[in-house]
Image: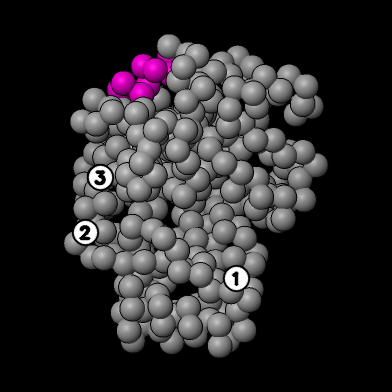
Amino acid sequence: MFPGQASQYVGMAQDLHNNFEEVRNLYKLASDELGEDIARFSFEGPAEKLKRTRFTQPAILLHSLAVLTALKESLPPFDYACGHSLGEYSALAATGAMSFELAIKAVVKRASLMEEACQVSPGGMAAIIGLTEEQVLEVCRKASKNGVVVPANFNSKSQIVISGSVEAVKVAAEIAKSDGAKRAIILEVGGAFHSPLMEPAKAGMQQFLKDADIKCSAVPVIANVSAKPVESSAEIKQLLVAQITSPVKWSQTMSYLVSNDCTRVIEIGPGKVLAGMAKRDMSAEKITNLDTIEDIESLATVSV
């Protein structure tokens, strides 16, 4: 499993960058694409800059790719790969569907397009805790007279993130509370991700991916849009574009993995967000986080 936006932290992957020339080369490639030194503000901050969509997404991708690079042949064999939102690119890179270089270029492009869409149509997101999928859909329906608001991330059985125009999201959060939600938290994000307000980003991403060298993955990758294995190169491209405005079906992805007898999970990249969700919703026998060199070194003692 590969994390997505909001898993970043200042100092992320610095130990990997310091110890592996191949990792430093990945950061140089990303910096050349961005026109900014992404290593410097990933390691030193400021946190506010690292939170910007244009920088957050490639920074998180680079961290996951850095761990994969450091692991090399010691990466345990796996039956499925998946990633939350931008993490799907990390999963595709891990399975050989796209090269690390292409993943970096694609995510730099994606992040830039999405940040531009945020500027065109400002929006927000809120986490609704304690309501069912049907209840959240009804909340969004009630609040939609105030603007666009839709489910954006089905993160777990008990947490669904909504996304849309600022006023509609605020109203939906209040309605959710009155309808019995345990909590409705307005999130500190730069825009209305995975909602129709991201529509302007899709054309540019489709154009970028049109001639991109994407292959069938060696191991099934569970797509965010469908919560099912993605098969062909054409389907991968289609779903990566659709993902920009479609909800992330993460809870459904975990259900798919459970139904296919997955009992062990490795989260690769910054933080432990996905591991926490897997602990609650998958009841996995073994959950491992690979974030730092220390984590990688301890992997040898972990039965996976």
Asked if residue 258 is positioned above or below residue 269 in the image, the reply reads below
Residue 97 position in % (x across, y down): 44, 30
Q: Is residue 129 visible?
A: yes
Cα separation between marks 3 and 2 = 11 Å
Circle 3 is placed at which residue position?
112
Q: Position of residue 25 (x, y in %)?
A: 36, 16
**Quadrant assignment for the N terminus:** top right
| Residue toward you, 263 or 57 | 57
Residue drawn 51% across the image and 22% down it: 15
Near mark 1 (Cα within 10 A), the count class, few <14, some 14-19 or many ≥20, is many
Instruction: State the CA–CA distance, disc 1 to disc 3.
Output: 30 Å
Foreground pick, 26 / 100? 26
- Where is mark 1, residue-wise? 129
In the image, residue 205 sits, relative to residue 124, either above or below, namely: above
Color theme of the render: one colour
Q: Which residue type does callout 3 highlight? A: Ser
Contact flag, marks 1 and 3 (Cβ < 8 Å): no
Residue stretch in magenta: 22-29
Q: Is residue 24 magenta?
A: yes
Amino acid on which the number 1 mark rests in the picture: Ile
Provide the major secondary structure of the magenta segment.
helix
Disc 3: CA contacts within 10 A as few (<14), some (14-19) or many (>=20): many
**Which comes sooner in the sequence, label 2 or label 1?**
2
**Most foreground residue, 252 or 75:** 75
Q: How many marks?
A: 3
Q: Amino acid at mark 2?
A: Gln
